[in-house]
Image (cartoon, rainbow, N blue to C red):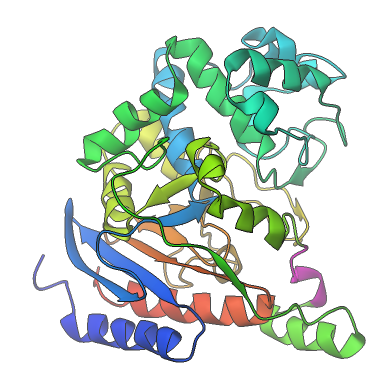
Amino acid sequence: MATRFDPSAVSRLESYLSELIDTGASQAAQYAIALDGEVLATRTFGAATADHRFVIFSATKTIVAMAILPHLADGSLELSRRVADHLPEFGTHGKDEVTVLQLLTMQGGFPQAPMGPKSWGTSAGRRAQFAEWTLDWQPGAHTEYHPIAAHWVIAELIEALSGRSFVEVVHERVTAPAGVPAILAAEVDGPVVPVRAHGEHPGTSPEALADLARVFGRPDLVPAISIGADALLSMNDPRAQAACIPGGGGRARAADVALVYQTFLDDTPWRRDAIGTIRNGSLNIGDNTPASRTVAGVVAGHDGYADLRWFPATAPRAVGHHGAGGQLCWVDPDTGMSFCFLHDTLEQHPGVELTRIRRINELAHACVRP
């Protein structure tokens, strides 16, 4: 292990992250690199301490989805079955056709279905809200990122199949085996860094779109905004944090996430499937890249779009799920390395954000040799 770990590469990564703080691009940040079940390097920058947690937004999704794997393994849940077979309240307004696989891979057809504070606190409230949801398109016809809705259904499936709170089950099955505190919890064991917005979207003028196209490679690859800054900033509210929103409410330290991702390499059939089998490769509505989705996350891929999926371009088998603002969480089966970068800032300029993400991932992946 020591011969594969490159301290000089770590120094280059830390220098770059320090520059982000010095220039005001971020005010607080944290990273961690883990290998063979151990954290090899971690550091906190700016207005945070090693005890601080960061809101990880959609990086929560993979952590929640991994908790459903035991039910796929024992046959109590099948990818081809309808979600409504387990949650009858979901089977309204055409949603009775949605399969478990479509739910897990962003093909359900209800990307912006609402779930608010009046409903999310109880199983009965969530199910009543499911019954009101309508479809934007036929299940399986398209792939569109579901920022929040799909993972409320996944959480409810976990409760229906386990007979227990999804928050309790996610910790028992995913975070506790890694030896880390709960990442999705009503209360966490440390202060939480406030989220802030920074910069401005360049707009839609021909000049702005041309500049973005140069960063992303083509005009049609510039991503559409799926969830606005105001909604993301609402995660500063302690009540929203305590709600344990399964699609975006995790709060974590980088080292904790890196250790959780180490457990994803455990050699069991459904874990191998969850980190290696692409079950949806159709084009995403919103950014025109192939979805490259497993049942639990996203694979970097060999198709030249790894960096647009927020993975290192040099790690085609890396898998994970990023979070808004540039929260990076992945594990590379080829090196065994897991990496997490967390910070406090929602950069509003997508070109600035992608440029930063590319550089962080490049520097991080160089820290461990195959």
**Res 218 visible:** yes
**In the shown orientation, is residue 61 left or right of residue 336?**
right
Residue at 58% from the left image edge and 24% from the top image edge: 121
Residue at 33% from the left image edge and 49% from the top image edge: 261
Q: Start and end of the magenta stretch?
A: 219-224
Q: Quadrant of the C terminus?
A: bottom left
Viewer-proximal residue among 247 and 189: 189
Viewer-proximal residue among 356 and 124: 124
Q: Is residue 32 above or below residue 75?
A: below
Q: Quadrant of residue 51?
A: bottom left
Residue at 45% from the left image edge and 53% from the top image edge: 319
Query: Is-magenta flag for residue 290?
Result: no
Q: Is residue 124 above or below residue 327?
A: above
Residue farthest to the front, as pictured: 238
**Res 75 visible:** no
Query: Is-magenta flag for residue 220?
Result: yes
The percent position of residue 33, horizontal first and vertical second, equals 26, 65
The percent position of residue 219, horizontal first and vertical second, equals 81, 76
Q: Quadrant of residue 151?
A: top right
**In the shown orientation, is residue 8 left or right of residue 311?**
left
Q: Across the whole image, how many numbered discs are drawn on residues? A: 0
**In the shown orientation, is residue 216 left or right of residue 363?**
right
